[in-house]
Image (cartoon, rainbow, N blue to C red):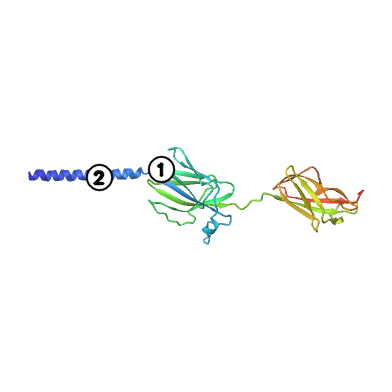
Amino acid sequence: MREFNKGLRLMLGFAFVLIAGYAAADRSAAALDSPASLTLNVYTCDDLHDPIDPNQTLVNECNLGPGDIPFTLEPVAPQGGSMMASTGTGGHPATISFSELAAGDYRLVQQMPESIALAYVAQCTSNVRTFDYPFSPFAIIESHGRLNIQLLPGEQLTCDWYNILAPEQATTTTLTFTVYSCSGDIIDPELCDLAPDVELRLSSPNSEIVLTSDADGVATFDGQGEFQLEPVSALDDRVFCGFHSSSDLVTGTLILDLANPLAIDAYYCYPGA
């Protein structure tokens, strides 16, 4: 009877080890199947922000509200459809999250508008691993807004994502008029006088602008589009005899665009010249 009890204790002890081992294995399998998540805190920085400047001031330079920017997360190896989230238009930072993710490799894509010159990740934190930062910033985003990310089982990964605005782009170009009053029969800036207080009109289907030459005979306009030109003022003993640009007569429609800044001379001539 004593030997039987001893054997029973051995059997029970062995069974306990098996059960304990199964429970441990079951917990490990459950951990491997635990869903992961990715959270991005998206900041927008002004165009003066330099991500590698050790004296950068993120609080002051990166407190702009983002526009509504979509992010897409898709598995690198086909294992399901892609997911999309958007920053919306409020908050600095704006926070987006992807949850219930299987462990694996993903590609995160920000649909970068032209207003963003550069994006980078400053830092990431995780509940299952730590990161060393031998380089700063943590990651520079590829020019099309793409970044590969690996998620571990059960990982809750949070990253600070910074978008740097592009320098403000010019949307207009300058049109410069110089007005001359000529007393002879030759039209030449060297032989004519500058004419102040002369009005010229720019007309388009949507607007009409009247410019007045200053004391140096100069009038300027910043804009873009198609315009018709005509003189408004009449000068004593002079008649308007044409607009010229680089020695060419300007007639018809004037096209003003970013690639085509113009300087035009307006001439008033002696009658009969």
Residue 210 - label: none
How many circles with numbers are drawn on the protein?
Answer: 2
Asked which quadrant contains residue 219, the reply is bottom right
Asked if disc 2 and disc 1 are in contact, CB closer than 8 Å, the reply is no
* Residue labelled with disc 2: 21
Side of 57 relative to 132 (left or right)? right
For the point 79% across and 48% down, which residue is it?
A: 201
Q: Nearer the viewer, mark 2 or mark 1?
A: 1
Residue 100 - label: 1
Could you classify mark 2 by the number of other residues whose Cα lies within 10 Å: few (under 14), some (14-19), or many (20 or more)?
A: few
- Outermost residue toward the right? 272
Q: Amino acid at mark 2?
A: Gly
From the image, which quarter does the N terminus lie in?
top left
For the point 26% across and 43% down, which residue is it?
A: 22
Q: Secondary structure at mark 2?
A: helix
Side of 25 relative to 213 (left or right)? left
Quick one: label 2 or label 1, which is nearer the N terminus?
2
Depth check: give the residue in front, 141 or 254.
Answer: 254
For the point 34% across and 45% down, which residue is it?
A: 31
